Amino acid sequence: MKNSRNKGKVNERAWASICTNEGYPARRGQQFRGGEDSPDVVCESLPMFHFEVKSGKRPHLWDAVSQAERDQKTGQFAVAALHKDYHPWMVGMTADTFFRLVRGDHL
């Protein structure tokens, strides 16, 4: 269990680093807020997103999106950032979330 927790922290930091490198400074959420509904990664320049980070041999997209939806605040978009071992990062969301973004519901 301890090893999987450490791997989770490493991947949360990795996703935060990717956001930061793309111009959106981010940090791990749990270490600062500590609540169970805290996002895994906090990106204050993208407050409309609630990020749930999952990684491993077979990260489960539906579980990650469901957790992000359950924990998101009103008006946020639930986003799963997924990293499969030896593969690039992916971002997942429901079709409803995707079309809310396309329509610009966050503006």
Image (spheres, rainbow, N blue to C red):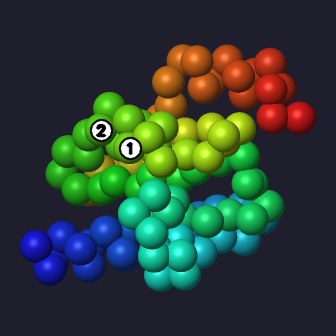
Asked whether residue 91 is in view, the answer is no
Mark linked to residue 63: 2
Mark 1 nearby-residue class (10 Å; few <14, some 14–19, many ≥20): many
Residue 22 in percent (x, y) is at 72, 61
Residue at position x 46%, y 58% in the image: 37
| Quarter containing the C terminus | top right
Residue at position x 18%, y 51% in the image: 57
Mark 1 = which residue?
A: 67
Of residues 2 and 89, the one nearer the viewer is 2
Residue 25: quadrant of the picture: bottom right
Asked whether residue 37 is in view, the answer is yes
Of residues 100 and 7, the one nearer the viewer is 100
The reply to whether dot 1 and dot 2 touch (C-beta < 8 Å) is yes
Residue 33 in percent (x, y) is at 53, 76
Question: Callout 2, which amino acid?
Answer: Asp
User: Extreme left residue here?
Assistant: 1
Residue at position x 54%, y 18% in the image: 95
